[in-house]
Image (cartoon, rainbow, N blue to C red):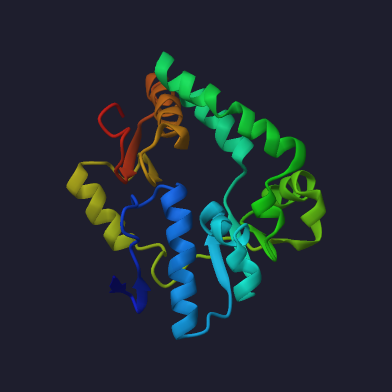
């Protein structure tokens, strides 16, 4: 357990940070039950499938805590993105192995997501797609656009000039910034290929990448 920015962070024994699995879902429900017994929890808010273990478990009825989940995409979107970015036969075989689950969700919806009290989409396009895919829960789909802390993320001309000077980039040339986890399904390589085409046509461009991940060596 640790605290960051006033938020308590609990790590579940025997689980891997950033990965869902049976151990995570079971452990998160047990942890929630223990926390609720000490100090009542008003609402559970999960990222994507993060709270799925709770809503499909007997603890949902026993605890009665409302549950909402925030979505940044759909499993089908992720699947096709994974297929497009799969590199090598082994990677594609792993993607193919997930196909039956994706087809089941497209046909009947995910029972965990359908059981949510609220499904929050971070874009209007996603909200429309979710209302179509999760029709029984369409009335519970809400669009809440991602917010930005405008005090922290704002134009800073002096800092921009300092960075350009440190990297040797003239003021007249365009800089593209890509930020996030470096995974193939995120499409960083697609952006780099596009920028390479621009550069080959004689247009001076520069790419800055902020992040780290498994795809970093190849990128």
Residue 13 % position (x, y): 31, 58
Q: Residue furthest top?
A: 89
Kindly identify the residue that appears in the image at 62 percent across and 61 percent down.
Answer: 55
In this image, 155 relative to 131: left or right? left
Quadrant assignment for the C terminus: top left
Q: Residue furthest left?
A: 166
| Closer to us: 31 or 160 | 31
**Vertical relation: 88 (above or below) 110:** above
Residue 12 % position (x, y): 35, 61
Quadrant assignment for the N terminus: bottom left
Res. 99 visible in picture: yes
Q: Quadrant of residue 214?
A: top left
Q: Quadrant of residue 89?
A: top left
Residue 64 % position (x, y): 64, 75
Res. 65 visible in picture: no
**Vertical relation: 66 (above or below) 173:** below
| Closer to us: 95 or 111 | 111
Kindly identify the residue that appears in the image at 71 percent across and 54 percent down.
Answer: 114
Q: How many marks?
A: 0
Kindly identify the residue that appears in the image at 66 percent across and 69 percent down.
Answer: 61
Kindly identify the residue that appears in the image at 31 percent across and 40 percent down.
Answer: 213
| Closer to us: 89 or 188 | 89
Residue 3 % position (x, y): 30, 74
Q: Residue furthest bottom?
A: 39
**Vertical relation: 199 (above or below) 124:** above
């Amino acid at each position: 357990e640790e605290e960051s920015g006033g938020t308590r962070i609990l790590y579940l024994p025997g689980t891997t940070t950033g990965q869902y699995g049976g151990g995570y879902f079971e452990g998160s429900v047990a942890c929630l039950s223990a926390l609720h017994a000490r100090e009542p929890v008003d609402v559970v808010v999960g990222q994507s499938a993060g709270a799925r273990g709770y809503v499909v478990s007997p603890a949902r009825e026993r605890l009665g805590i409302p549950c909402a989940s925030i979505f940044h995409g759909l499993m089908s979107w992720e699947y096709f993105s994974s297929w497009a970015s799969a590199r090598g036969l082994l990677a594609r075989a792993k993607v193919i192995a997930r196909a039956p689950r994706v087809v089941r969700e497209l046909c009947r919806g995910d029972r965990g997501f359908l059981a949510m009290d609220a499904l929050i989409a971070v874009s209007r396009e996603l909200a429309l797609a979710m209302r179509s895919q999760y029709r029984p829960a369409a009335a519970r789909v809400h669009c809440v656009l991602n917010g930005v802390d405008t005090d922290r993320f704002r134009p800073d001309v002096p800092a921009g000039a300092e960075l350009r000077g440190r990297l040797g980039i003239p003021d007249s040339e365009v800089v593209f910034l890509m930020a996030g986890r470096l995974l193939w399904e995120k499409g960083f390589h697609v952006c780099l290929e596009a920028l390479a085409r621009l550069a080959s046509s004689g247009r001076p461009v520069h790419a800055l990448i902020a992040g780290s991940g498994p795809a970093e060596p190849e990128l």
